[in-house]
Amino acid sequence: MSLLVKDTALKPASSADEIVVRLTEAVHEHRILPGMKLSEDEVGDVFGVSRTVVRQALRALSHGGLVSIERNRGAFVAKPSIKEAREVFEARALLEPQTARAAAERATPADVAILESHIEEEHAALASGEAGRALNLSGLFHVEIARIADQATIEAFIRQLVSRSSLVIALYWRRRSALCESHAHHALLDTFRANDPDKAEDIMKGHLVDLISQLDLRDMPKETKSLRDALS
Amino acid sequence: MSLLVKDTALKPASSADEIVVRLTEAVHEHRILPGMKLSEDEVGDVFGVSRTVVRQALRALSHGGLVSIERNRGAFVAKPSIKEAREVFEARALLEPQTARAAAERATPADVAILESHIEEEHAALASGEAGRALNLSGLFHVEIARIADQATIEAFIRQLVSRSSLVIALYWRRRSALCESHAHHALLDTFRANDPDKAEDIMKGHLVDLISQLDLRDMPKETKSLRDALS
DNA sequence: TGGGCAAAGATTGTATACGATCTGCTTTCA
DNA sequence: TGAAAGCAGATCGTATACAATCTTTGCCCA
């Protein structure tokens, strides 16, 4: 499946990290969907490396919760359950508002400029029909806030949660066609410009609530769920 | 260095996870100290497996922040900087109080019993001079709370933070002889018995503050710091 | 005709081998 | 005598080979 990446032979993909980055990007942009099998041989062929390094990459991704490895069965892109989906956003609700507050306190004009460029890129991607890329950039916006807050540890957690959110969105998003063009990111940007921590915290809290509300996390009848699973 | 584990030949240590668990335990119990080198060959010899599986284990530990891998130099038990130490406890401050609240709401008598046994074991370990084991159990108490809260995602984060806290304690604990015998765990247990979320949240918040206050995280003169670093 | 068993194929788990890189010591020259 | 270059040893990074396990398919028998 050469649809994993656009350019297979351009970069030598020296280390396993390269593969991790590429696969992560592909998942974030929904070019690889939850449940898809990631065969070691196949990935190795695509990136031109041996299984050894592919395995390293897959293990790394599994630690981030992006893929699940089943013994003697292989690696698959993770399919978060509804419970896991809720948990991811509950964790984000604990971490991100406070982080946005800290970021608003510390944000410099340079930081604001970086966030602005993020939003611009996201807008451009949406305009050119690259919905996946826009979604990825939208997630990176949240990670960038943690970086501005100067909290590397929390940043790593948020990065992981944003990652898994991308899977959740792929699985449970209500209307695929509807653009996730919320004003929240612009509003956050304003609070950073004004160094207004209180407002930043509030807006982030509301933004996360909005995100959850756009998901369909109702417990479906189990039979339907398992049937759909069996047919996939 | 056979001091890594007590019994080398008893268990075959089939998978890499076994090694991860053993090494993690050893670090938590301060039998392995920050900065110590974890040679692949050496660890492989101790556990009777090849470097392949040792490398898997070390990579896994590095993703958890417990060891740091330097390219072409090897794996070392991580030595969190003062900044990282602060970050770890700031992250805990964001996650754990709310988690304790949720746990207090949900805690059943069975859950309380488990926590009680934790405290008992910890006390017994202290009495028999196994300070390291007591410390480890003390950390697991926090992880158990996340499990009671039924938040697997947050539990994984807290597990990681507790892990790194163990390194921080090894590096920055003020008085090595002083027992970390705080009443906090008993008090938390009471709030779980009474299903008192508000109090649980408060106590956890205070407990974490107490923990930080027992660390010596003052910025030392940089020359001393770098000198000591260079000499280590 | 349907269910169960068995063998073949495919895929992962582990070990070993070889090449690359770093560290520390020795040697040599100014 | 000191410093720099080079060599030897050790350790890590990657590829390949073999063993273990699972899945599938085809056959046989009730």
Image (cartoon, coloured by chain):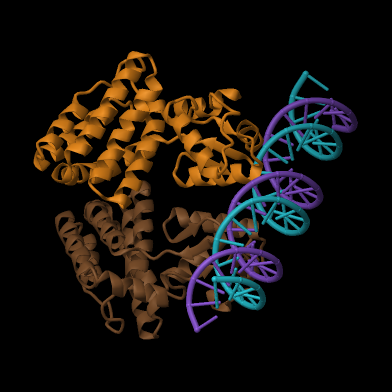
Chain colours: A brown, B orange, C purple, D cyan
Residue B71: horizontal and vertical position, in percent? 61, 46
Position of residue A102 in the picture relative to residue B78 (left or right) = left
* Residue pictured at 39% horizontal, 37% vertical: B164
* Residue pictured at 35% horizontal, 62% vertical: A162
Task: Examine the image and state in which quarter residue A127 appears.
Answer: bottom left
- In the rendered image, the quadrant that contains the N terminus of chain B is top right
Instruction: Evaluate whether residue B232 shows in this view.
Output: no
- In the rendered image, the quadrant that contains the C terminus of chain B is top right
Front residue of this view, candidates B141 and B211? B141
Residue B13: horizontal and vertical position, in percent? 56, 38
Task: Examine the image and state in which quarter residue B114 appears.
Answer: top left
Identify whether A162 is placed above or below B137.
below
Instruction: Evaluate whether residue A228 shows in this view.
Output: yes
Identify whether B232 is placed above or below D21.
above
* Residue pictured at 24% horizontal, 33% vertical: B115
Front residue of this view, candidates C29 and B5? B5
Task: Examine the image and state in which quarter residue A130 appears.
Answer: bottom left
Residue B176: horizontal and vertical position, in percent? 36, 17
How many callouts does the rendering have? 0
Residue C24: horizontal and vertical position, in percent? 72, 28
Position of residue B221 in the picture relative to residue B230 (left or right) = left
* Residue pictured at 22% horizontal, 67% vertical: A212
Identify whether A109 is placed above or below B189.
below
